[in-house]
Amino acid sequence: MGGIHIDETAVNATLPDEIEKFLKNAPAEGVLFFSWGSMVRSSSMPSEKVQTIVKVLEQQPLNVIWKWETDEVPTKSKKFLFVKWAPQFSLICHPKVKLFWGHGGLLGTTENIYCGKPLIVTPLYGDQSSNAYAVQNRGIGTILFFDDINEKNLQATLKEMRRKSNAENAAALSHLFRHQDMKPLDRAVWWVEHLLQENGKMAHKLLQTKAVKLNWFVYYSLDSVCIILFALAVFYFILRAILRRLSGLFKGDKQSVKVKTK
């Protein structure tokens, strides 16, 4: 149920002092929040890739909050704030945060849609690629694959993200997401209660897989396997017969040639 994990009270939650101070002193252009989630360590990236990102972001009008897992940071520039942890949802929804660079995880992408911010997506594993293309197709962000991160591509991506249409599309999608007939949690509860009516008899019929009514031979697709094997066997024997016939014809031609020669 999309958005069921979102706690709307966290939108206005108090941020850690370090982050709050950094946001307060940010320029009018705002802040880019860079996080690839809890499963991916930005600090483990190749150093040349990190330095490329730092070099390009230093040239941008945006300040940067970067989720970074170690004490040793790649730059001391005041444009950057490196944090080991951040309240992602509250931070993305902060009015000073103008752009999110994430990895396309479903939960983070959903939070970003709720907050209405354009985003850069670098998909790394799992469902992230499909989520990234969904973001791009809806005009609220763009994809930058990890292997494509270089100075030229990152500059082009950031330039693309400054287009007004990205922010407008993100805001429009956020409005639609927030103004549903039911909250995601309420919808989930309603459907559970609905299916549990009549002691769950109807739910049992609707949700039970048809596989329970199949015999073991069909359940394991052995019928399909047999058909495929039969077709392959027929093909093999036909091909074998044709090759034998052709081989016999060639042998017959050679023998007739030898007789004529004698």
Image (tube, rainbow, N blue to C red):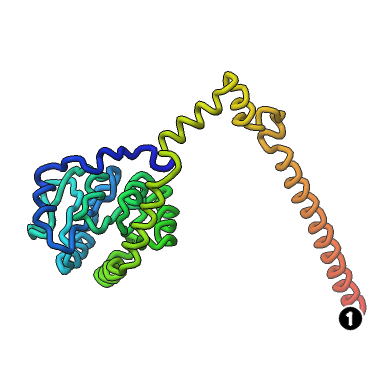
Q: What residue type is labelled 1?
A: Thr
Q: Where on the picture, by quarter, is residue 101?
A: bottom left
Q: In this view, does 8 lie above or below 92?
A: above
Q: In which quarter of the image is the C terminus?
A: bottom right
Q: Name the residue under label 1.
A: 261
Where is residue 96 shown, x and y percent of the image? 19, 55
Where is residue 53 shown, x and y percent of the image? 21, 63
245 or 194: which is nearer to us? 194
Q: Can residue 18 be seen in this view?
A: yes
Sort mark 1 into few (<14), some (14-19) or many (20+) by Cα contacts within 10 Å.
few
Q: In this view, does 40 lie above or below 133?
A: above
39 or 203: which is nearer to us? 203
50 or 201: which is nearer to us? 201
Q: In this view, does 260 lie above or below 221?
A: below
Q: Is residue 143 visible?
A: no
Give the residue drawn at x 42%, y 60%.
138
114 or 207: which is nearer to us? 114
Q: In this view, does 27 lie to the left or right of 111?
A: left
Q: Quadrant of the N terminus?
A: top left
Q: Where on the picture, by quarter, is residue 116?
A: bottom left
Q: In this view, does 130 lie to the left or right of 16?
A: right
Where is residue 237 shown, x and y percent of the image? 81, 53
Tag 1, which secondary structure?
Answer: helix
Looking at the rendered structure, the number of numbered marks drawn on it comes to: 1
Q: In this view, does 75 lie to the left or right of 101?
A: left
Q: Is residue 200 left or right of residue 148?
A: right
In the rendered image, the residue lying farthest to the bottom is 261
Give the residue drawn at x 36%, y 52%.
174
Where is residue 148 shown, x and y percent of the image? 33, 65
